[in-house]
Image (tube, rainbow, N blue to C red):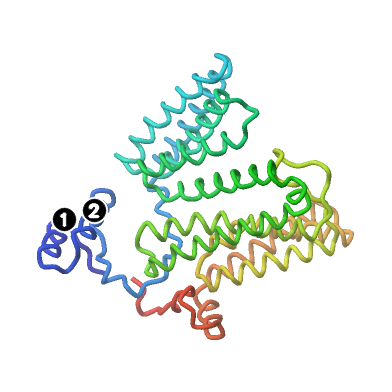
């Protein structure tokens, strides 16, 4: 595999092989990760489609733990001092850490923790100042905060947080403007939001079919967000809702054995879609629902809960291992019967693997 250092990138730019924009992006990669593979050398490789570039070492994990503990402490301290401005000061502290870990060292995991903390502190602080009785304003503040964060940090997981913030805003608006319509159609709301998020993910994938740029990373996080929305919405539609909701947003549902079987079928269909799109993230984010359905089915058949859980873990684990090991073979078989649409990446060619 051919790699390029800074001097080679300069030469390639001077000779017109790559554009100035591509050269600048590759120099940033060199500064972060060392020598990089030029795009032309990787043009046919669709094997590492879910490369998150998320954790470079245990140092990232260690720092992320520290930021999480610090954020929890600041949250408690802000509450003791009455909230409001104190939460905003804590948000400012998170923003400063984000500027260092997100822009200077480009450590994704610590920056993700600062993003979550920044979002919560900003929402809580400004929400208290404008009034807790204005959920629409609080939701709009959430979106503005995450758009600003993404503008300065430019890390892919912010796209998913922006998408979630927009979903919360639309839900809040619908709850205030058409509460009667929303009351009986929450499931379709989740499904619609899930498919819109999935569409955005596919859009990003189509802009980077080689999956070498930030577009592919943006798509990964959107895929990871879309699957639970779709599965939860469809599962809830097929179930009997309880009167309670979790956090006044996510319904807690009661299911029958038929509902559990339907849920398992939905997850399987999501898995086939993930295989077609070459996105394992779609399947992974649905595994919890699959585990719930399997446990419920075994329990309904008279197996005690402990054994049902063990069997579910064995079945899910074996399925993930075998599918993971044979992912490309299974996908190459599926591709033969799929339409020749551009949303489906080309089949994986072993001889191009680097």
**113 or 66, which is in the foreground?**
113
Left or right of 19 on screen, residue 271: right
The disc, 1 or 2, on the residue closer to the chain's N-terminal end is: 1
**17 or 53, which is in the foreground?**
17
Residue drawn at point x = 41 percent, y = 40 percent: 149
**190 or 317, which is in the foreground?**
190
Provide the secondary structure element on which disc 1 rests: helix
Question: Which quadrant, please, contains the N terminus?
Answer: bottom left
Residue drawn at point x = 78 percent, y = 52 percent: 184
Cα separation, mark 1 vs mark 2, equals 7 Å
Residue 354 location, x and y as percent? 33, 71
Q: Which residue is mark 2?
A: 30
Above or below: residue 300 compared with residue 111: below
Left or right of 33 on screen, residue 343: right
Looking at the image, which residue sits at the far front? 177
Left or right of 344 on screen, residue 15: left
Above or below: residue 20 compared with residue 326: above
The mark found on residue 150 in the picture is none
Q: Which residue is mark 1?
A: 6
Residue 116 location, x and y as percent? 50, 38
Label 2 CA crowd tier, 10 Å (few <14, some 14–19, many 20+) = some
Asked whether the residues under the numbered discs 1 and 2 touch, taking CB atoms below 8 Å apart as contact, a structural biologist would say yes
Provide the secondary structure element on which disc 2 rests: helix
Residue 207 location, x and y as percent? 39, 66
Residue drawn at point x = 61 percent, y = 56 percent: 193
């Amino acid at each position: 595999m051919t790699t390029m250092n800074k001097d080679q990138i300069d030469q390639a730019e001077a000779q017109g092989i790559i554009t100035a924009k591509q050269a600048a992006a590759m120099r940033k990669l060199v500064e972060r990760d060392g020598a990089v593979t030029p795009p032309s050398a990787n043009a046919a490789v669709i094997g590492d489609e879910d490369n998150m570039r998320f954790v470079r070492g245990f140092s990232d994990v260690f720092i992320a733990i520290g930021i999480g503990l610090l954020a929890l402490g600041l949250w408690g301290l802000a509450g003791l001092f009455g909230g409001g401005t104190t939460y905003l000061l804590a948000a400012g502290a998170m923003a400063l850490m984000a500027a260092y870990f997100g822009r200077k060292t480009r450590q994704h995991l610590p920056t993700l923790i600062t993003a979550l903390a920044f979002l919560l502190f900003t929402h809580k602080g400004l929400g208290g100042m404008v009034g807790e009785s204005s959920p629409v304003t609080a939701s709009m503040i959430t979106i503005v905060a995450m758009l600003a964060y993404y503008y300065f940090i430019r890390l892919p997981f912010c796209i998913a947080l922006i998408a979630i913030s927009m979903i919360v805003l639309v839900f809040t608006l619908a709850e205030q403007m058409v509460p009667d319509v929303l009351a009986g159609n929450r499931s379709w709301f989740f499904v619609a939001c899930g498919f819109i998020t999935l569409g955005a993910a596919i859009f990003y994938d189509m802009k980077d079919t080689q999956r070498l740029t930030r577009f592919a990373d943006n798509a990964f996080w959107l895929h990871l967000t879309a699957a639970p929305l779709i599965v939860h919405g469809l599962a809830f539609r097929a179930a009997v809702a309880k009167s309670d909701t979790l956090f006044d947003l996510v319904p807690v549902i009661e299911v029958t054995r038929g509902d559990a079987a339907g849920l398992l079928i939905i997850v399987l269909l999501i898995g086939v879609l993930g295989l077609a799109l070459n996105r394992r993230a779609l399947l992974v984010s649905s595994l919890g629902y699959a585990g719930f359905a399997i446990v419920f089915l075994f329990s309904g058949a008279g197996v005690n809960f402990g054994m049902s859980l063990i069997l579910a873990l064995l079945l899910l684990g074996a399925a993930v291992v075998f599918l993971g090991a044979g992912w490309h073979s299974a996908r190459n078989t599926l591709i033969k019967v799929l339409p020749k649409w551009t949303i489906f990446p080309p089949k994986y060619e072993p001889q191009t693997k680097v």
